[in-house]
Amino acid sequence: MTAAEISRIAGVTRATVSNWRRRHDDFPTPSAGTESSPLYDLPAVQAWLRGRGHTSTASPTEELRTALRLLGPGSGVAARLFPLAAGASRRTSEELSALAALPDDRLIARAEKTAGELPAAVPEAEPVRYGPADADAVRALLGCVREAGPQAAVDVLAERELDEGAASGVYQTPEGLAVLMARLLPAEASRVLDPACGSGTLLATAALQGARELFGQDSLPVQGRRTAVRLLLSAPEAETAIRVGDSLRDDAFPDVTVDAVLCNPPFADRDWGHDELAYDPRWAYGLPPRLESELAWVQHALAHLEPGGHAVMLLPPALAFRSSGRRVRAELIRAGALRAVVSLPARAAYPLHIGLQIWVLQRPEPGGTDRTTVLFVDGEGEQRDGAPGTASATDTATADAGTRGGSRPHRSGSSSSAASSSAASFDWAGLTNRVLGQWAAFTTAPDTYVDEPGVARAVPLVDLLDDVVDVTPARHVRATAADIDPTALARRVNDLHGQLAEQVAALAASSASGGWQPSGASAREWRTATVSDLARGGALTVLRAATPGTRGSKGSDAPTVERPVLAARDIAAGNPPSGTAVDIHADAAQPVAAGDVLVRAVAGGGDAAAMTRVADDRDAGALLGQHIHLLRPDPARLDPWFLAGFLGAEDNIASASTGSTHVHVTPGRLRVPLLPLEEQRRYGEAFRRVHELRAAVRRTADLAADTAATLTTGLTAGVLLPPAGPETSGSPGSRSV
């Protein structure tokens, strides 16, 4: 391990580690590396730190990553630890601690026995053998399972094995997207297949929705093991069958039909087997073109459905309009197999620069009801309402050429949390409600479904079967209604102008100078303490953030969602609690209370101050969401606004964070000035005013955007006239266009 890693696990600076090396003769000597970049033996460093009373401040997942890395590439230990992670999940915290304390030889023997307790549902789970060199990794795994949960340990193992296998282009389906896709299935769907199961996110989510027979296949062995272990952890009551292999070339379930298929298949795979599968009976809607591997996955899914069964698939946007796939799209529409297409905003899921689409398909039933329309839902409005930047046609073409640094296709299910982190501030709850509301109305009464301008429209099949057969939602969803009432719109514009004027006045009042004074000729200096120090002294209590998958399985003691859930995105945007079941924190049994200080566990978004928030009355009673650290200060010793203000400082966040692309905050390393309570309250009041200023800016910007959009709609739809003025009153010399 490097000096930087020593500083991280010891909770000190790198300069302190350098001082230790110079001042202490018994400091471990480098075991590898160079003189300028020495590497140290992890057990020796840990023993030295323990001998001086230093406890590790690194997270359990970081310690596991370090232990795996120290074994070097090609050790294969990550793959062999999957069944141990599942077996360890059945042990109590005390049993895991006792197991980790055993000597190496006894630890290895017990670990092999624990790993061998799993059923045959885990591909290649047996035989499992560990050697003496694996002891530190086994201990780190047990500690990670005990402290962070088995799913967090499984994700680290998959991350390591995927990195060693150079399996680039593999991305995890965001949890919010998985929930949306699963909820598009009928509630009674019990048998579910994912032929490209990746990390198992979709199957695990289907189990939460009630599925009891789960089938999965993936071409990567690491993903097969990961899915199998994940389902054993999250859905132990379900019957599972997970296999490894290429689903298109070597279908592991050729005779299995299911109620539903959920799938995020590889994109732009040019080597999917076009020539060898040319006469495959699955191509009931036409031979997929060589460059349209996604249409092969679509027909593979339909072939595995019972008549009337549904498939929900995440697909690239170019599949909706490329000329090479026109004939297959036309046959899907004529047969009534394509039921709905939902467009997603860019950055909702990988690849981030384009907006993907959800296709909802249904296998036709012999003698079933003729379907006359297809539903289109424009979910890209979520992106346009929040942040600019929907994908261009060039972006779309590039993504579907399958490049992203090479010709490797996109595959779902990475060990990285990149996709989830990028979508952490995305309003999945809003998009899910938007889509499910339209889908429910459409499926309940398709003949009487009423279009919603700018959101959704049901299009007759005959209108889709033109020369292009383009099923892009943006092409079919009308932005404005055809029957806008001019008088009503004019009243709305005047009302918006009034609200905007009031909000601008409120913003001006919030931004008015309030006696801000310089501190003196130089900046103030003060003694500080870390959050860990304050917690040990009883000044506050910390609840550590959790990662997805640690809540336990359905039917366990996981908290319900009858109350609102405060999500990390709510802290970033300043919104009231908007989370759903998938956002629940492992420690949500302890609800949020007014006065709690909330810190986002993953930094990003460019606004360091939005990393923190003081819970108010609207948050009180809400369940704690994932990726949030909750700090509960003792009001007799710490002012919450003072605490939140200093914790959210950009330099403070940076010094307490690890990672580069996705920065994870370690709350115990955040520092707070040691000031008397009365002075804390003075600072706290100032931070509260800054918070109100930021909130006023957001409200003003939202109102201004709403007003501008309404005016544009009214003018372009012909229901509003421009105001009369000197420029439009027909002055001499004016001419028409």
Image (spheres, rainbow, N blue to C red):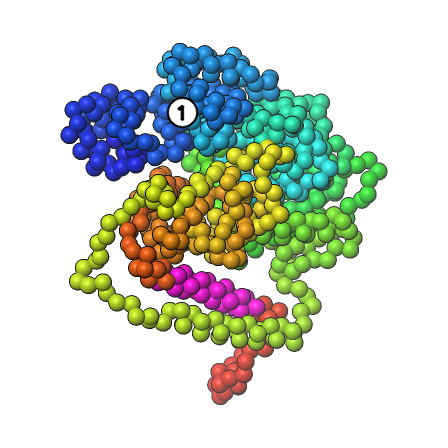
Kindly identify the amino acid type of the residue bearing the numbered disc 1. Answer: Ala
Residue where numbered disc 1 is placed? 140
Instruction: Give the residues in magenta.
Output: 686-710
Who is closer to the viewer here, 254 or 690? 690
Q: Residue furthest bottom?
A: 732
State left or right for residue 505 relative to residue 117.
left
Q: Name, please, the residue furthest toward the right.
A: 367
Residue 118 or residue 335, whichever sits in front:
118
Q: Is residue 267 above or below residue 476?
A: above
Principal secondary structure, stretch drawn in magenta: helix
Seen in the picture, residue 24 relative to 571 is either above or below; the reply is above
- Specify the quadrant of the image occupied by residue 336: top right
Identify whether 676 is placed above or below 154: below
Q: Which residue is painted at 43% across and 48% down in the image? A: 632
The image position of residue 148, as x and y in percent, is 46, 33
The residue at 33%/32% (across/down) is 56
Neighbour class for label 1 at 10 Å: few (<14), some, many (≥20)? Answer: many
Magenta-colored stretch includes residue 158: no
Label 1: element kind: helix
